[in-house]
Image: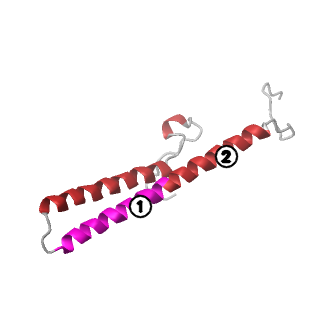
Amino acid sequence: MKLKHKINHGWAPDRTDPVWAERVEREAEATTAATERAYRKAQARLAKAVEQVEHEVKRKHSDRRRLKRLQHAVEARRQELLVIEGMMRAVPASAQHRGKGSHRSVPSGRTI
């Protein structure tokens, strides 16, 4: 049977431009490093906000409004951290754009 499409058996030369490949790798590392720095800074801001709440609770004459404002700040910092974690876990290609070939059905729970 004669195949009418080109099949690459692995002997074709690698035509990837080394300058382009190096640039892509450098930009990927820079993006990853920036996201990790942002994550560490968000963790530090959350820890500081929690520490401020604990300090306000320990005070003898704590202000309820200030305590409430500090608790809102803790929640905002926690949400910020969750957003960054989501960005770090995100897959570049969503399930909608992966094509039919990569579709995996959900297991029905039956054992075969």
* Camera sees residue 108: no
Badge 1: few (under 14), some or many (20 or more) residues near its Cα, within 10 Å? some
Across and down, in percent, residue 89 comes to 49, 52
Residue positioned most to the top: 4
Residue type beneath disc 2: Arg
x then y, percent, for residue 84: 44, 51
Q: Which residue is mark 1?
A: 43
| Image side of residue 6 versus residue 108, left or right | right
User: Is label 2 in a helix, a strand or a loop?
Assistant: helix
Pointer 2 residue: 26
Residue 100 or residue 73, whichever sits in front: 73
Q: Residue at x 46, y 56 (%)?
A: 39
Q: What residue do we see at 79% from left, 24% from top?
A: 4
Mark 2 and mark 1: span between their CA atoms? 26 Å
Where are the magenta residues, as a range?
38-59
- Percent of width and height locating residue 18: 79, 40
Assess disc 2: are there few (<14), some (14-19) or many (≥20) residues with their C-alpha within 10 Å of its C-alpha.
few
